[in-house]
Amino acid sequence: MAFDFIFTQSFFSTVLFQALALLPLLLYASLGEIVAEKSGVVNLGIEGLMLMAAFSSFTFDYATKNPFAGVVGSLAVVAVMGLAFCFLTITLKVDQIVAGLGMYLFGLGLSGVLYAIFTSGAGVGASGVPTVPKLEIPLLAQIPLIGPVLFEQNLLVYLSLILVPATSYLLSRTGLGLRVRAVGENPKAADTMGISVARVRYAATMTGAILAGVSGAYLAVGYTGSFQLGYTLGRGFIALSMVYLSNWNPYRAFVAVFVYDFVDSLQSAVVINTPALAASSYLLALLPYIFVLALIPIFGRKARAPKFLTIPYRKS
Amino acid sequence: MQGRRWLRVASYNGLAIAFGLVLGLIVVAAVGGNVVLALRSFFISPISTTTNLGEVLVRFVALYTVGLGVGLALKAGLWNVGGEGQFVVGQIMAFIGVIYIGGIPASVHIFLILLLGAAGGLLWISVPTILRTKFGANEIVITLLFNIVATFVGLYALNGPIRGRTQSFGFPLTDLIPPSLALPLLIPGTRLSIALFITLGVAVVMYLLVERTALGLRLSIVGESIETARYAGINVSRVFILVMLMAGTLAGLAGAMHATGVLGFLDPGELQPGFGYLAIIVALLGRKNMLGIGIASLLFGYVIIGAQDMAQVVPAQSGMVFAMEGAMLTGVSLASYLLARRGSP
């Protein structure tokens, strides 16, 4: 087998470009889940939310021929599901794990059913909706070598990058962030100080739901232009493990997601260029997952979850 | 008192199922199906023929075997959300046993196949167990990740080591299992095998383990409060390890029994059987009680067949069943809220 192609410039650019293009699939969801979990609510159902967002953005996009309408419409759908989850876990205080798994299965199944109904009615194929356009940044995109890689990305890629410092700033430097952390670390004390625990948790969990929706919508109308049953391939769960790996730190989450995406785009580029590896392509596709699992003993050891994560708050 | 508790648990189950049923009916109505007919098939079809009744029991066997492990782990306060992956790896290992072992009497071979399946489940939960007990990782996230990994490993196996020689037009699947290695059937015309007795045997052992042994007592204490358990001198991580490994082994065994006794072959569709997730619902509905899980499994065996029959008019049948399960799980959480409000523990 010849792996000479690995050392070419075009291979390097392709891998790096792909790694960046994959970022929004996990980054929005991970950042949103960090915010939600900081307030003490874990949403295991973000995979289901992502699937519903992917499906509905695809449908809205198909109907309006406008990918932005697809994204916005899907966020409305996700907001309804997020509200239902908040009502169950924060207002009714049911077990977050059970409610989250319910959301996952519900979103997985309903998006598949609705897509099947939609395609059998509209007769659309597996792909073919317009996608969110690439944004070529003037001048910077002209830089040789890295210009096209860094500055000809999708609009949602840039937004996800901006969101990293924004989330970090919001959580650690603003009063709002302080309230979110207080509610996750010591809801009783926060309550005594006059903070509405329920309201803060609703806001944080809804932020997580909406951002998971952006990840899902990006998959359908930003990255591929198509949808299928179970299309997200467990990315919601990977985002949950990224949150844990990052020790609830947005910058570290970015690093973890980027390295994961880099390994992923590297292995797929190698497989495409090496026909001999076709038979093992399923095993190579596992590399990024194995990578995440291998990082857990290294970084997970020091991880410390918000103290009241998954614990409903009851006024005594 | 006892009677009223049973009534409450029954209404608990009923509410959860009603949730899924209502969602299913809405979807049926949306695609222009006959709602009355759908309701009829949901309730009547599982018991209408011997074949369907056999199918209900086949689901009962798979759910109860996985659910016992999930319930055991829950009793100790651990979530094994990875039953799905352990089940799949059990299926794959069983077929590795079918293909790569030979030259021994069929009965010994069958035994080895089941053993391999159980070992596959054990293997699949061992890494999450180590990460949970040695590194404090969240077992829910890790076991979920291992479900995805299992699907990929299954696709690799179906395209390589266990791929059949039969013409399949590029579609990866195994050969049919030789009749001598299939688990013997109990009732002609059904797919119900002696796996039923294996499951019932396992259930008795698990019941005795939880109710009558020191280990059962220890794991209940750990599940109630880790601090109390430590205070009482219980080695918490040893209990965790034991419980997790047993849960994985049972899910792997269930996969092997399902692959060799019910399916007879594997294809990519069988890499997401859904039993692992349903087992969680069943363990919760059975209130972590080894007998209660059995009743809930039987009920859900009935519900799955009813839902599948009802979903025939819907384009994505498997999606419909998933969505109904999700609604049922939401029903479970709502019911737990209602029960808690009425002051029951």
Image (tube, coloured by chain):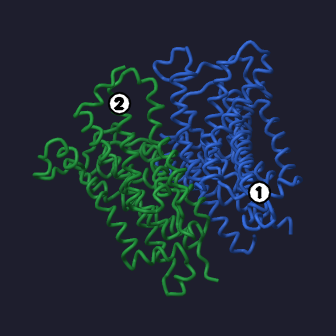
Q: Residue lying farthest bottom?
A: A193
Q: Residues within 10 Å of mark 2 (few under 14, many from 20)?
A: some
Quarter location, residue A89: bottom right
Could you tell whether B134 is left or right of A176 in the image? Answer: right
Quarter location, residue B217: bottom right
Q: Nearer the viewer, residue A235 or B37?
A: A235
Q: Which chain is blue?
A: B
Q: Whole-percent x and y of residue B240?
A: 71, 53
Q: Which residue was labeled with disc 2?
A: A270
Could you tell whether A97 is left or right of B108 in the image? Answer: left
Q: Nearer the viewer, residue B185 or A232?
A: A232
Amino acid carrying mark 1 in the image: Asn
Which of the numbered marks, if any, corresponds to residue A252?
none
Q: Nearer the viewer, residue A141 or B317?
A: A141
Q: Whole-percent x and y of residue B38?
A: 59, 46
Amino acid carrying mark 2 in the image: Val
Please indicate, yes or no, whether residue A59 appears anywhere in the rendered image: no
Name which residue lies at 34% across and 61% down.
Answer: A164
Could you tell whether B112 is left or right of A218 in the image? Answer: right
Q: Residue lying farthest top?
A: B103
Q: How many marks?
A: 2
Q: Whole-percent x and y of residue A73?
A: 33, 58
| Above or below: residue A180 compared with residue A118 | below
Q: Which residue was labeled with disc 1?
A: B235
| Above or below: residue B173 compared with residue A75 | above
Please indicate, yes or no, whether residue A273 appears anywhere in the rendered image: yes
Q: Quadrant of the N terminus of chain B?
A: bottom right
Q: Whole-percent x and y of residue A3?
A: 33, 25
Secondary structure of the residue carrying numbered label 1 = loop
Q: Residue lying farthest right?
A: B212
Q: What is the display colour for chain A?
A: green
